[in-house]
Image (cartoon, rainbow, N blue to C red):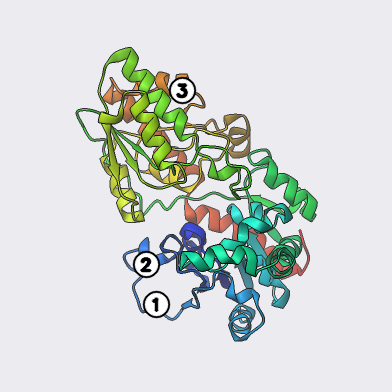
Amino acid sequence: MKVGFYGNANNYPFMLALALQKLGHEVLFIISSRDALNRPEFRYDHITLPYPPWIHDLSSRLRWHFLVPGSGRSRVWSLLNGCDFAVLNEEGPALAGGLRIPYVALLTGSDLGVFADPAKIDTLKPQLIQRPRWISVACRWLFPSGLIRAWLTSPQRSGIANARLVTYFARGLIPDGDRLLDEIGVSDARRVFLLMADLPLNPYFPPPQNSPVRIFCLARLTWKNEPGSGLVALDYKGSDLMIRGLALFWKKHQVRLDIRLARKGRHVAETEQLAHELGIADQVTWLKELAQSQVRDEYKGADIIFDQLADGVVAMGGLEAMATGRPLIANARPEIFDPAVGEPSPVCQARTAEEVCRQLERLVPSRDERLRAGLAGRKYVERHFSTEAAAGRLMDRISAIVASGRNP
């Protein structure tokens, strides 16, 4: 089967595309963004420029230029209509009106929580043209809300509504997302819970023996509520709870840690100030924003890794950290996640500063405990979240749809 892809948030769809190729399917992949996080050459060493023939770079400075009638949009439709099935991510569902083939909406966050939410229209305007900044700011006045609704929000909702399958988080993890899907008319029968980790790219490494114990936070430092910012539940990481928990551990035990934080997220300055206020600033090493390959190096060198501590989801980043064999401290949402997966998660569960401290008290003094927790995480990810297993489950559903021509 030939599967076409549009949209590549954080290279998550590209992971699925590579897994489909391994299963013997033909793939056509459209690159629509110039953001490094959404381009495969910044994650995979074997993907270089110029791209191989199956990857089509149609990106432009205009963030959503394919949504406007013209040759670019026609080119997208022509490429995708040459496939048997399409996988649409980011603004891809808004283009579904020109497709003559069945498709799945692969939703990863903003494509539902922002692009398909009429209440978020004003937050989209500065994103239309990302650089230079003065043009981005001017978009608040240049583009009326009705135009954004016509270009993106309404067709995005329609595209999601008409998808044969919609991949999203398990019901209950993201209530706002559940609300939007219910409004749009996506039944639970069409929803697929799909999470993946790239195991070949993140092999197991024996734990290091750092002294002091090294901590790495993979989550963005975004944690302050900002009404009207366009942030959704997945964007808030509870980074302040991590800092408070680390400070509580220091206060109780006077054991120094090597804490490594990347300057990425909305509240870097606030996080730095909080570390100063709580007396652990001298234990923090600040890193510039990291490429994905550098993040993998941080996984390898860390003893303990942090992910989100708020009401988000342990997703690709956290799963890949676990795949390397590192204990992961996070809020894994076990009350929802464990029934969805069918097995208790080995994540070191924490959603308060006190719980963070208790996990540190268990892990920091004992390399054996870190080894045990890390191995449990690796095996868990192998059982449930390999890209090949996810691709196989999805293709079973897709093949049945293509054969029947009907919604499930």
Q: Quadrant of residue 125?
A: bottom right
**Residue 364 image point, x, y percent:** 30, 23
Q: Which mark is residue 226?
A: none
- Depth order, front residue of 288/314: 288
Q: Which residue is mark 1?
A: 51
Q: Which mark is residue 353?
A: 3
Label pair 1/2, CB-CB below 8 angstroms: yes
* Of callouts 1 and 2, the N-terminal one: 2
Q: Name, please, the residue furthest toward the bottom.
A: 71
Label 1 – label 3 distance at C-alpha = 46 Å
Q: Residue at x 30, y 30 (%)?
A: 281
**Residue 240 image point, x, y percent:** 45, 31
- Depth order, front residue of 65/277: 277
Mark 2: secondary structure: helix
Label pair 3/2, CB-CB below 8 angstroms: no
- Depth order, front residue of 230/346: 230
**Residue 366 in view in this figure:** yes
Q: Quadrant of residue 220?
A: top left
Mark 1: secondary structure: loop
Q: Which residue is mark 2?
A: 41
Amino acid on which disc 2 is placed: Glu
Left or right relative to 230: residue 25:
left
| Quadrant of the frame with the N terminus | bottom right
- Depth order, front residue of 239/42: 239
* Of callouts 3 and 2, the N-terminal one: 2
Q: Residues within 10 Å of mark 2 (few under 14, many from 20)?
A: some
